[in-house]
Amino acid sequence: MATTTADALPPLVRWRYAWIVVAGVAILLVALYADSLWLLNWVHVFFGLAWTGIDLFMGFVLGPILRRLRPDLRRMVTTELSARFLFMFPMLGIVTPTSGWELADRLGYLDLPYPQYWWIVAALATVILLAVLGTGILLPLNLRMLSELRKREPDMALVTRLVRIYFGLTATIALLQLGMIVIMTRFRLGL
């Protein structure tokens, strides 16, 4: 039986959003190779704010709203968000810590004596935890959710559980990022 355009399912990975990764990495490379501490700082702050802001919004605003939507609306919103975030979050998770590490190196933070060096350790441990949660758990979960939503008759009970885990993880990541803001504020005001 042939499917019509109205019945066509969106692809699992929508490559038209790959420009998000290309743009983010290009901006990072310009900042890394430019001789501008201001530009590197801007990239780190901008992408860090975007990452944290999106996670806070997803975990504490959109998550509770989605739980109350009808399953068909939840499916549509979740599918569209997941398609974009599949590219956006890994890019933010690469650009933000890479620019932060380079910034720390250029500002001499990597050469601090103990006990001030523990702030570097705290930042690095937080970034590693964010990477494990984001790339190791959230990304596969996002792919699983997209895969299930592509089915003609998705198991909405499974999708609901996955969405609940997804938003719980984004809330956890948002809290870790708030902790990272405390660490970064300490850096900004001097160790």
Image (cartoon, grey):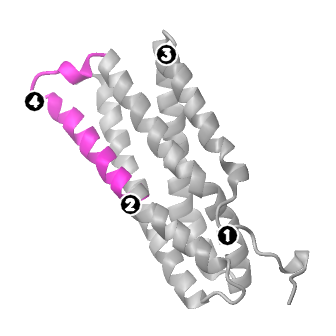
Nearest to N terminus: mark 3 or mark 2? 3
Residue 8 marker: none
**Amino acid type of the residue that numbered disc 1 sits on in the rendered structure:** Thr
How packed is label 2: few (under 14 Cα within 10 Å), some, or many (20 or more)? few
Mark 2 lies on a secondary structure that is helix
Can you identify the residue that label 2 sits on?
Answer: 136
Can you identify the residue that label 3 sits on?
Answer: 33
> Residue 8's spot in the image, x, y percent?
82, 76
Can you identify the residue that label 1 sits on?
Answer: 79
C-alpha distance separating marks 4 and 2: 31 Å
Residue 185 visible in the picture: yes
Front: mark 3 or 1? 3
* Foreground of the two, 109 or 133: 133
User: Would you say 12 lies left or right of 94 here?
Assistant: right
C-alpha distance separating marks 1 and 4: 46 Å
**Amino acid type of the residue that numbered disc 3 sits on in the rendered structure:** Tyr
Mark 4 lies on a secondary structure that is loop
